Image (cartoon, rainbow, N blue to C red):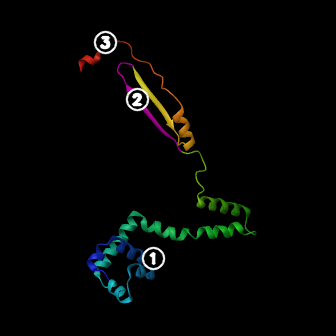
């Protein structure tokens, strides 16, 4: 067994013991991972500093939501089997069967089902007086073929040059 002081500083070790206390990991899994025999396991329970570190970690995991997420992950893996039973049950209400199909499809995550979100950016350049240059662009994610096509397009932003040279503002600087 590693030195108790070293294990107290090992966050992964403390987290594993915390998961054991939360019934997320089994005793056998923790013993196997950390190569503990029964005697060492018993001595760990007598270490007050270790028990305090585990309690602090449990509190931290509750506050940041990781304990809840890991517990939910353990339970949600049962959902596909339950939904499959409902879907395959000929005597079940057809609406329930269809709902279970939809839920299974959502769990399977087949990818985006709708139009992807777009990014929009607006660039405003104030040239002084009443001259402004505005570029209002909406960008959607491109497939590789669309990106290649757009690279080959010669598109130019049309604009108007300021030709009034009666005032030479550049000389002020």
Q: Is residue 156 left or right of residue 60?
A: right
Q: CA distance from mark 2 to mark 1?
A: 56 Å
Residue at which label 3 appears: 167
Q: Mark 3 vs mark 2: which is more N-terminal?
A: 2
- Disc 3 residue crowd, few under 14, some 14–19, many 20+, Cα 10 Å: few
Along the line of sight, which residue is nearer the eye, 57 or 152? 152
Report if the CB atoms under discs 3 and 2 are less than 8 Å apart: no
Q: Earlier in the sequence, mark 2 or mark 1?
A: 1
Cα separation, mark 3 vs mark 1, equals: 77 Å
Residue farthest to the right, as pictured: 90
| Residue 81 lies in quadrant | bottom right
Q: Is residue 129 magenta?
A: yes
Q: Please tell me the numbered disc located at residue 93.
A: none
Task: Return the disc, 3 or 1, that comes first in the chain's sequence.
Answer: 1
User: 57 and 156: which one is in front?
Assistant: 156
Q: Residue furthest bottom?
A: 39
Compared to residue 103, the image places residue 41 above or below, namely: below
- Where does the image place residue 39, in percent across and percent down from the top left? 35, 89
| Residue that badge 1 annotates | 25
Magenta-highlighted residues: 117-130
Is disc 1 placed on a helix, strand or loop?
A: loop
Residue 38's x, y, as percent? Answer: 38, 88
Q: Are marks 3 and 1 in contact (CB under 8 Å)?
A: no
Q: Circle 2 is placed at which residue position? A: 124
């Amino acid at each position: 067994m590693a030195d108790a002081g070293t294990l107290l500083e090992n966050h992964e070790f403390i987290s594993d013991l915390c998961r054991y206390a939360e019934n997320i990991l089994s005793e056998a899994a923790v013993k196997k991972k950390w190569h503990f025999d029964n005697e060492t396991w018993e001595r760990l329970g007598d270490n007050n500093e270790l028990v305090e570190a585990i309690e602090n970690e449990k509190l931290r995991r509750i506050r940041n939501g990781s304990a809840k997420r890991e517990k939910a992950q353990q339970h949600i893996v049962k959902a596909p089997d339950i939904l499959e039973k409902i879907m395959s049950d000929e005597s079940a209400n057809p609406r329930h069967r269809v709902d279970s199909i939809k839920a299974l499809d959502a769990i399977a995550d087949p990818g985006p089902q709708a139009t992807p979100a777009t990014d929009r950016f607006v660039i405003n350049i104030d040239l002084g007086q009443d001259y402004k240059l505005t570029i209002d662009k909406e960008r959607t994610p491109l497939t590789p073929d669309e990106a290649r096509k757009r690279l080959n397009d010669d598109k130019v932003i049309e604009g108007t040059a300021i030709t009034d040279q009666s005032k030479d503002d550049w000389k002020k600087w």
